Structure formats: structure tokens, C-alpha cells
Amino acid sequence: MLQPTKAASHLQGNLSELRRGAELESLRPFVKECCCFLPSADPDTAQITMEELKKLARAWKLHGKYS
């Protein structure tokens, strides 16, 4: 069986990172609507971090449904 080259592996990693970024960006309107960004951050350009996602889950009341 052929092993993927280093370049192919790197490309796969970059593609998965782009998909992840696109998925996070699709949540931006909801994060903005629920005011999950820090007050000092620009909601249109700020990076979406795990903290904003946690705040969004709390706003959507997801933290208690699956625990």
C-alpha cells in the first residue's frame, strides 16, 4: 500500500483546517446575535474561540441537554 507523501499529508491538514474555519464562520451571525464576543472585540473580524462557542452553547441552553 502506498503511503501518502509529506506534501499530500500537509495538503490534507490544510484542507481540513479550511473546512473547520468555514464551519466556524457559519456560526458568526449567531455568536454576534447572542453577544458572545468580548465588548472590546469587533464581532465582524474577531476570531471565534472556544470561549465564544461555550457562551453560544449556554445561550442556546445546550450545556444542560447532553450532560
Image (cartoon, rainbow, N blue to C red):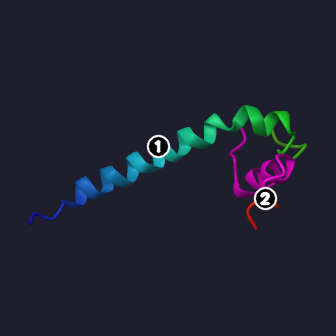
Q: Amino acid at mark 2?
A: Lys
**In the shown orientation, is residue 5 left or right of residue 40?**
left
Give the residue drawn at x 76%, y 36%.
30
Q: Which callout, 1 or 2, points at the residue further toward the start of the chain?
A: 1
In this rendering, the answer to whether 2 lies above or below 60 is below
Q: Nearer the viewer, residue 49 or 42?
A: 49
Query: Could you say which quadrant of the image residue 39 lies in?
Result: top right
SS label for mark 1: helix
| Residues at marks 1 and 2, CA–CA distance in whole angstroms | 30 Å
Q: Nearer the viewer, residue 46 or 59?
A: 59
Query: Could you say which quadrant of the image residue 6 lies in?
Result: bottom left
Q: Position of residue 49 (x, y in %)?
A: 70, 53
Q: Which residues are magenta?
A: 44-62
Q: Nearer the viewer, residue 61 or 1?
A: 61
Q: Position of residue 28 (x, y in %)?
A: 70, 36
Is residue 53 covered in magenta?
A: yes
**In the shown orientation, is residue 5 left or right of residue 50?**
left
Circle number at residue 50: none
Give the residue drawn at x 74%, y 31%.
29
Residue corresponding to mark 2 = 65
Circle 2 residues within 10 Å: few <14, some 14–19, many ≥20: few
Residue corresponding to mark 1 = 18
Q: Position of residue 47 (x, y in %)?
A: 68, 45
Give the residue drawn at x 68%, y 38%.
27
Q: What residue occupies the far left of the structure in this picture?
A: 1
Q: Position of residue 43 (x, y in %)?
A: 78, 36
Q: Is residue 44 visible?
A: no
**In the shown orientation, is residue 10 left or right of residue 49?**
left
